[in-house]
Image (spheres, rainbow, N blue to C red):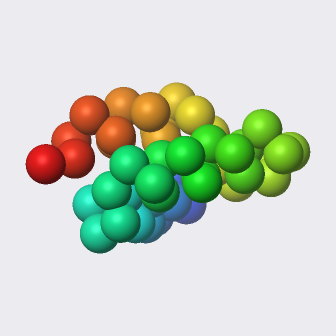
Amino acid sequence: MEIINSLTNQIMYIISEIGYIAVVIITAMEYACFPAMPSEVILPASCKIQ
């Protein structure tokens, strides 16, 4: 469970620092079969971009 929390925190930090381009890059990595980036974490996190 700690791995999921760590991954989620890291993804949210990247998205908050870079913005929507980070969502595009991370989502592209997921579709390129990079398994550590679940869209269930990425896409809801993108709603928090200000």
The x, y position of residue 3, in whole percent, is: 55, 60
Q: Quadrant of residue 16?
A: bottom left
Q: Please give left or right for residue 25 compared with residue 41 in the image.
A: right
Using the image, determine if residue 27 lies above or below residue 25. Answer: above
Residue drawn at 80 percent across, 52 percent down: 34
Residue furthest to the left: 50
Q: Count every numbered label the image shows and give the total.
A: 0
Locate residue 48, reporting x and y percent: 21, 42
x then y, percent, for residue 14: 40, 66
Nearest to the observer: residue 12 or residue 3: 12
Using the image as rendered, state which of residue 26 and residue 38 is in the foreground: 26
- Is residue 50 placed above or below 15 in the rendered structure? above
- Up the image or down, 17 lies above or below 37; here it is below
Q: Residue at x 47, y 57 (%)?
A: 22
> From this viewpoint, is residue 14 visible?
yes
Residue 31 lies in quadrant: top right
Q: Residue at x 44, y 33 (%)?
A: 43
30 with respect to 4 (left or right): right
Q: Is residue 25 above or below residue 10?
A: above
